[in-house]
Amino acid sequence: MNSITLPDKPQAPVAAGLDVFPKRRLVIQYAGALADTAKTLGFGVVAALVAVFTLWLAVPDIARDASMSRVGKSVVEETAGIDGKCTRSKWILVSCDARITYRPDPDSPREATVEQSFSFMGTKYNTTVSVLRSTVYPERVTTTLAIENLGSRIFTTLLTFLMFGVLSIYCFRMAWLGSQRRWLEGKAMVMTPILVSITGIDGHNNVKFTATIDGHEVKASNQLREGDTPMYVGNKGLALAVALPDSPHLILLDHDLTALAFTDLERTQLRAALS
């Protein structure tokens, strides 16, 4: 068991009151899971799919246009036609769609139409657009607008991928921690009572708190059930929690002391000792 340092040097009677905490094995009835594990996992999967889809959608076009952006790798295709528009959202995100009509084989009259869509961050862009044809692969075409904003397109794609990638990792982590806490429920073990410092409570009754373990400050968070409040000790800066053997999780106890399977006598004795 890690050594526990009581925060903010509570008064001796309060610290001594922890001695009445049951030394027997207690069943965990509620472990303070942070969120609905299935829903959080679902959000993580959706975010991961969006991140992958962003790369799948943008990278081929970016790679093609990057090869055509080098000097001598493309020429203006005078016979091609273009129809499209760009719209701005959030002041800096520009989304463009274009339909290019051209002859894949310059020596054949057969025409084809390709659609081009891309987004980039910028405050302004060139509204005069021409069609470019690859000098290496004549069947490939793009627009001058796409080439001129190639760097911003790469940045926007990477930023979108990182945003949804980080969100998916966060959701997976929360789902994993939630499943670990739910796995603890129903288990019986001997626990160590500790006093923790409450640092915040949000609108979803998610309580953030800190404790000092082995000389290091540990930050933790439990979501109490609807209507529950922490088991405050003395002033409202301190509350009662328990540390589990061989586990990094701390469980914050609720005011009614129902998170653990105390007997009515144990609840009465604990409240009297910590009041």
Image (spheres, rainbow, N blue to C red):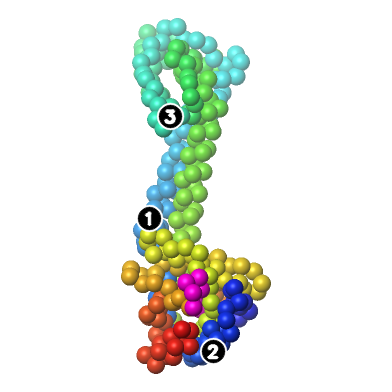
| CA distance separating discs 2 and 1 | 43 Å
Query: Residue 19 has which mark?
Result: 2
Question: Which mark identifies residue 138?
Answer: none
Tell me which amino acid carries mark 1: Gly
Which mark, by number, is residue 91?
3
The residue positioned 45% from the left and 76% from the top of the image is: 232
> Which range is magenta?
234-243
Closer to the camera, 200 or 138?
200
Give the CA distance from mark 1 to mark 3: 31 Å
| Badge nearest the viewer, 2 or 1 | 2
Mark 2 or mark 1: name the one nearer the start of the chain: 2
Q: Earlier in the sequence, mark 1 or mark 3?
A: 1
Label 2 and label 3: CA atoms lie apart by 61 Å
Image disc number at residue 42: 1
Characterize the local packing of mark 3: few (<14), some (14-19) or many (20 or more) Cα atoms within 10 angstroms. Answer: few
> Total of numbered circles in the picture?
3
Identify which amino acid the numbered label 2 is placed on: Asp
Looking at the image, residue 178 lies above or below residue 168: below
